Image (cartoon, coloured by chain):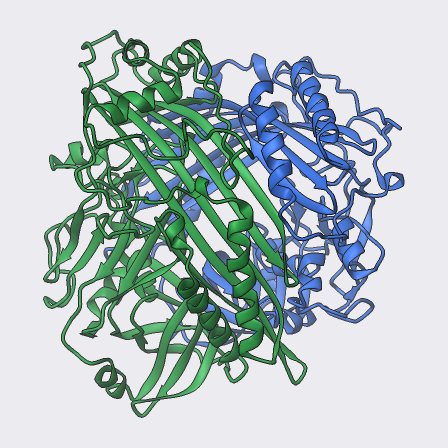
Chain colours: A green, B blue
Amino acid sequence: MDRRNFIRTGSLALAGSVVAPTFASPFDGTNEKTAVSEAMKHFGVTENDLQKVIAAALEKGGDYADLFFEHTFSNYVGLRDREVNRCNSNIDFGMGVRVISGDQTGYAYVEEITLNEMLRAARTAARIASGTLKANPVALTEKSIKTNFYTVSTPWDNLLLKDKMPYLQRLNDRIFDADKRVQKVSASLTDDTSHILFCNSEGVTFYDYRPMATLSAVCIMEENGKIENNYASRAYRKGADFLTNDLVDIVAREAVENTAKLFQAVKPKGGEMPVVMGAGGSGILLHEAIGHAFEADFNRKNISIFSDQLHKKICNENISVVDDGTVPFNRGSVNIDDEGNYGQKTYIVKNGILNSYLHDRISAKHYGVTPTGNGRRESFRNVPIPRMRVTYMESGNMNEADIIASVKKGIYVNQFTNGQVQIGAGDFTFFVKSGYLIEDGKLTQPIKDINIIGNGPKALADITMVGNNLELDNGTWTCGKDGQGCPVSQGMPSALVSKLTVGGES
Amino acid sequence: MKFEPNKFHSTNEIMISNENKNLARWAMDFALKNGCQAVKVNLYAGSNSSFEMRDAKMDRLQQASENGMTIALYVDGRYGTYSTNRLDKTELQSFIKNGIASTRYLAKDEAQTLPDPSRYYKGGKPDLKLLDPNFSKINPDHKVQMAKNAGEEAMGKDARIISVESSYSDGENFGYKLFSNGFEGETGNSWFSISASVSMKGEDDARPSSYWYESALMLDDLVKEGIGQKALERTIKKLGQKKIKSGKYTMVVDPLNSSRLVSPMISALYGSQLQQKNSFLLDKIGQQIGNEKFTLRDEPHLIGAMGARYFDNEGVATQPRTIFDKGVLKTYFIDTYIANKMGIEPTIADPSILILQPGNKDLQGLIADVNNGILVTGFNGGNSNSSTGDFSFGIEGFLIENGQTTQPINEMNVTGNFLSLWSSLAEVGNDPRLNSSWRIPSLVFDGVDFSGI
């Protein structure tokens, strides 16, 4: 079969040449049959090839096999010292074969998509089983994307690098103009476009076209000999319409505000205290305190602190928490996951009850439930495992002001950089970049740079007030698990956790 | 001028192939012919395999190999990098041409130059012995057995065990650099690792878990016994973890975790941070940063050691260097770009093997000298501020009372500032783990803030 000539790197069309076919544009999905067949042509495979590879994958008696093809174009443009003077483009191309036998997994991947290479990968992965071929694969039927949560009107490849530069320049200039204390700005724009082709031994095949864009700025300020730094960023699954002056101005303003407030900030006194989580970024509490512990691979292995809690009451009945793959243009959204299940909105907590874990294929089978569309992988180099998507708590009925007013002595937190969790012990943490002391029901002194730690089940049970102001945080969040990263996001209404352990001075 | 790369004595096949080296040379020449004044080509190739067991059954096996190229283009005073795993000449032609055209749009950056060739590694040093010549001959059944053995050491040994996971993994990494002003260099290493983790049911709902692992560059050097055993012991010790009172304690950090406290110090020494005025060690060369127990050196040429290398990612020759000498800061990490940008002498892009000068006691010996302290056996999240040196991390570990570890603790934070932390370094242990390029022993610090109840 021929190798396709993948001439597009993104950010540039060959000057003066005819631009067809445009590989960085989505394959035509409006005519139902063609999206997958176009994708197969792109990867240089036929249905016959795919069936041969699946058969090889199952030849040692595996129950199930899937093939995941990926072609990703990534671009980065950066500004440093007032100039847009750096760029990188990357092409990643390959396919992975997964074989499942019971709850065991064999996996292999190749970067050259020839029949021989794919068969070699299939036979490697097949060795997770040790019998003989059980069943013949099934003819492929295209699963078309029911709802596209990230339609692209202008593919990134339509932009030249010079079309992107003015936005970074504007971001730089807005930040410097906003505050005389600004010393340095660095900014970056990234765009990724992935063509994904999938098929499995049950006859499911799909094509998904996945965009991702991020805009970020780091701001360094100096005041009276003290230096502080902070940043702002936004990420959306969008094509080139992501880039607007409005977006630039939002990121610029936030980078400046976030940095400026650090000069007045102090470290609080450490210890246990009430914590008011501000709307938006505080969703990191959900991601770390319960999200990971609800991933069904940990629970079917019995090692999560929530392993015995399915369908039990775990918090106030006014609390519902969702893991949602259907938020339009969101970083964590999923048209169809990397196992062939549609992205969904899954209630993990419903009216205080642990309603559902987050499943991949293996765990859904283990628990005898329908898959939830959480089977995701970083790339063709990785097996899919349960991963979060957009994790948020639904709004309650209180005003944020009343929540703050109820706290005599505590802290209010609303900017975070990272978090982590031990899902067995239940210890979760997140790092507060900035927030405020609460004294006698009022926000007083700004605080910064402290870690907060808690216990998942306890913290959830200690959420005593929930605001009416749900916000999603559209920052550039990446979740790491099992050596692979997945883009996610999260959200919260403002909420009071009656007790968490706050880092600080003693 | 052309410099001879090191010759390897292994019979291994998956090194950078001659075909790909020729492709790299072709790519460099093609770029130079099509508008570049200078070019850097980097090739990599690698393979890896892993076998994971859970409760005596194979849970997951993975295997793959991969390769790719990154090309850095210097075009009319502009600089851009382009990488791809599609090593096909026809595609690379368009890829490189597109890259050149794209790079031309950027603003000029005069600080982007290749290093002065006099700084390059010129070859002739002894083989670093980082590559196991028998790598491709290892029987996969043997690999599975090593994973199994580690798990079997723990399985069934305690009624409270929920599950035992163990794994064997290995891999090889190869790199090849070709720069248009005369550098040509090749690197390669193998690695092997066995790990185990145990999950146990405590008295409440918690299911604490701990782990142990061993790793080496050569299979014969890989410790293969005792891993499951240690994972089990460490998990049993965690049962009954709870948080204790906030306060100032002597902090002891074990050698699995001590490098976490060194890392932000090293990050603060990178030229890119200094040039952006984003470092708490800015303008501090020659100043006393830590106390006299804090001597940190970069020793790049230790034969057979993880992290050993003769040149950095710019091809510049590595040398032994003192970073902190009895607490005094001696050197920054200044690469070619930052040297040009700031008008200062370059040093080296980053450290290779970091050695914190050890003391005389092992971890038990250090603990025996502590009356009221906390032994940190794990960090859980947290972060630090690169401009100020402030830090705050989640921790778990043990209370130390009168020279003994007593209560297992968790759900606490340690908070402070790195400048004052390293000034209160009380002791350095003699027990760095050698299976890491950073050889940081156990550490003891006085008067550190922990927050709990």
Asked if B168 appears above or below A445 in the picture, the reply is above
Q: In the picture, residue B424 is in which quadrant?
A: bottom right
Q: Nearer the viewer, residue A85 or A455?
A: A85
- Residue ID at (17%, 49%): A345
Q: In the picture, residue B71 is in which quadrant?
A: top right
Q: Nearer the viewer, residue A482 or B355?
A: A482
Q: In the figure, is residue A293 to the left or right of A357?
A: right
Q: Which of B369 and B171 is in front in this view?
A: B171
Asked if B351 appears above or below A79 in the picture, the reply is above
Q: Where is residue A220 in the image (x, y as percent from the top left)?
A: 60, 70
Residue B286 visible, this orientation: yes
Q: In the figure, is residue A218 to the left or right of A426?
A: right
Residue A431 visible, this orientation: no
Asked if B43 appears above or below B370 in the picture, the reply is above
Q: In the figure, is residue B312 to the left or right of A504?
A: right
Q: Position of residue A439 (x, y in %)?
A: 35, 90
Q: Nearer the viewer, residue B430 or B258?
A: B258
Q: Where is residue A26 in the image (x, y as percent from the top left)?
A: 33, 34
Residue lying at the far bottom in this picture: please name it. Answer: A440
- Residue ID at (21%, 32%): A30
